[in-house]
Amino acid sequence: MSPPTDCFGSPEAVTDDDVAAALVRVSHLFAARGGDRDERAFAAEWLDQTTNHPTTAIVAELAARGSLAMLRRLVVHPDPYIRWVAAHNPFAIDADIQLVLAADPDPRVVTALVEAITLTVDACMVIAAGPHSEVKRTLAARPLGDDLLDLLAADRDRVTARCARGQLSQRRPGARQGSTNTVAA
């Protein structure tokens, strides 16, 4: 049985973007309603099915514009592209989501997070302690607190350490560029 064309248009006219936009609207409706236990169970099942949809374009659209509940599922999606898109979602300001994305094994995902939003201190600490030198270099060039810069100044990557020490030396009169030590005032 085919859908009535007066409701949906011709089947050829419906694109992945149309389907994704509809799924996003429905996810926002589920998120806005507390609902009873059966409704919450249905919503959870629906989230599982949509966030694991086989069409990458649909899941990417959900990652870009989906609800906070969807984003929490998609930041651990097996496809790094989906996680990269999720890092650009406005809900990525959520502290828990930032921690997950900051620890991502793919440096492109972590870079997207650093470039897309203002990070929490905890997310910065995870990145600073992580393995991605190129992301730490980007982070070290940003205005950070002294504790984070101290951590980055001790990094094994010389470029990261030099950048962080440079920032620290501008803040701490008498500090040498090549050292993390400061002179007491």
Image (cartoon, rainbow, N blue to C red):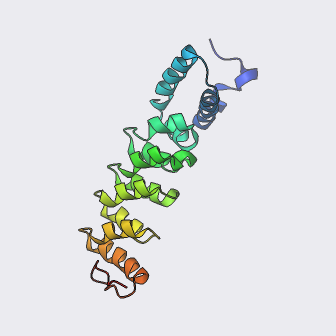
Q: Residue furthest right?
A: 6
- Which residue occupies the extreme left position in the image? 156
Find residue 160 and report its image quarter: bottom left
Q: Residue at x 50, y 23 (%)?
A: 44
Using residue 20 as the reference point, say whether residue 178 is left or right of it: left
In this picture, residue 179 sits left or right of residue 142: left
Task: Give the percent coordinates (x, y) of residue 79.
Answer: 39, 41
* Residue 58 seen in the figure: no
Q: Identify the residue shown where x is 60% and y is 34%.
A: 24
Front position in the image: 175 or 4: 175
At a point 44% along the width and 30% down the height, the residue shown is 52
Location of the N terminus by quadrant is: top right
Write the residue at 59% across / 17% down.
Answer: 36
Q: Is residue 158 visible?
A: yes
The reply, left or right, for residue 14 in relation to residue 137 is right
Question: Where does the image place residue 48, in percent across and percent down from the top left?
Answer: 46, 26
- In depth, the one of 185 and 92 nearer the eye is 185
- In the rendered image, the vertical position of residue 40 relative to residue 165, given as above or below: above
Residue 87 at what x, y percent from top left? 48, 49
**Corner quadrant of residue 108:** bottom left
Vertical placement of residue 181 versus 23, above or below: below
Most distant residue in the front direction: 185
Total numbered labels placed on residues in the image: 0
Is residue 101 left or right of 4 when viewed as pictured?
left
Residue 95 rendering spot, x and y as whole percentages: 47, 47
Quarter residue 167 falls in:
bottom left
